[in-house]
Image (cartoon, grey):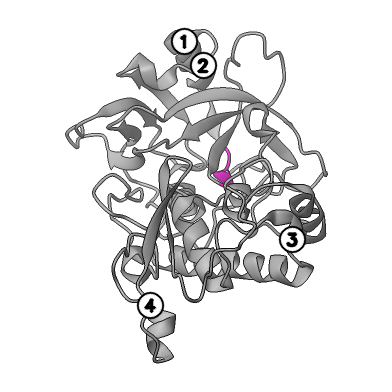
Amino acid sequence: MPELPEVEVVRRGLAPWAVGRTVTAVDVVDPRSVRRQLGGPDAFTTALTGRRLAAAVRRGKFLWLPLTDAGPLAPDDGAAPSALVVHLGMSGQVLIQPAGKPDENHLRIRLHLAPELSTPADVEAVDASSVVDAPAPDEPEQQLRFVDQRIFGGMHVDRLVGTEDGAPGGAGSDAPLIPSSAAHIARDPLDPAFDAAAFTARLRRRRTGIKRALLDQSLISGIGNIYADESLWRARLHYARPTETLRRSEVERVLAACREVMGTALEAGGTSFDALYVNVNGQSGYFDRSLAVYGQTGRLCPRCSANGRHSVIRRDSLMNRGSFTCPVCQPRPRNARW
């Protein structure tokens, strides 16, 4: 499942191509991909047609595009600001394609975007660090296509609510707004408004294992199975270490490892094991080449090998998924919590 770096790569790719464009038409190819929309496909189409995409915003693994301009709002929303919320799920892809390009296999939703890229005051500035060059003004109609093989992801239009702390909702916008369906999601460790002290206090009050806590998106967002394993390996902590026994210095070490591993993954374009995860150009990331423990069962631990020790990566089952550790530099605690 895409984690923070993969979703951020998609966000950066969307910004220069989609932000500032108006949705001229909507094709719901598969209604299952708008199942979260109150009112179904018709309400989804009505809520988007004629609206302008004002920004591309991300918190953790959650992605949304605020909507502006005089277009009909979703039923019962009144004048509340709204956004197009994108759930990538297990296999969702958001692609920007020219109108004449043949449809992809597993195409679920198609948004027709006006050829002109307008930049009124209510549209956020395009991120200059985006991984895709901005379009030329005379380009033909673009299409934002949602492709999803397994149909665990989807799109819906949701009202925006104020953030609890008054800080920006996420990366890509200064507005202190977040979709109501994502309001329970905690800030991620790359967010400037992330409160490390509050996180440490909440974490140490838990009675669970550190990996289970890192996967709890209401505690800290953006971290999934891959980056949890990689971060804990870098922090030299076992996934079953009880959270209540963690010292503040150890929590700081985990947070530093999370930021380091996700920052490195972001530079590599994310982690792709197959053709399911791609950026808006259809290109795969290559961080999988740098994985130290995740998926490395039976291989030597790179840190131990560098220190002249022989230690083989092992795989355990936790929460119906694999957890990968080095038994030497990540010893299992006696008072392990699952």
State which region is magenta.
54-60
Which tag is nearer the camera, tag 1 or tag 3? 3
Evaluate if marks 2 and 4 touch, with contact meaning CB atoms under 8 Å apart: no
Q: Which numbered disc flags the more N-terminal residue, 4 or 1?
A: 1
Q: Secondary structure at mark 1?
A: helix
Image quadrant of residue 154?
top left
Residue at the image point whose x is 48% and y is 16% from the top: 44
Provide the residue designation for mark 2. 37
- Disc 2 or 3, which lies upstream in sequence? 2
Q: Where does the image place residue 105, in percent across and percent down from the top left?
A: 19, 32
The alpha-carbon separation of the residues under discs 4 and 1 comes to 54 Å
For label 3, the SS is helix
Residue at mark 1: 40
Question: Spatial distance from mark 4 to mark 3, Cα to Cα?
Answer: 26 Å
Residue 282 visible in the snapshot: yes
How packed mark 2 is, by other alpha carbons closer than 10 Å (few <14, some 14-19, many 20 or more), is: many
Q: Is residue 203 above or below residue 245?
A: above
Amino acid of disc 3: Thr
Question: Is the residue under label 3 in contact with that under label 1 (CB below 8 Å)?
Answer: no
CA–CA distance in space, label 2 to label 3? 43 Å
Q: Position of residue 152 (x, y in %)?
A: 39, 29
- State the CA–CA distance, disc 2 to disc 4: 50 Å
Callout 1: few (<14), some (14-19), or many (20+) C-alpha neighbours within 10 Å? Answer: some
Q: Which residue is mark 3?
A: 245
Which residue is disc 4 drawn over? Answer: 311
Give the structural element (helix, strand or loop) at label 4: loop
Which residue does the image show at 53% across and 65% down from the upper left? 231
Mark before the other along the chain sequence, 4 or 3: 3
Q: Nearer the viewer, residue 185 or 131?
A: 185
Residue at 55 percent across and 12 percent down: it is 38
Of labels 1 and 3, earlier in sequence is 1
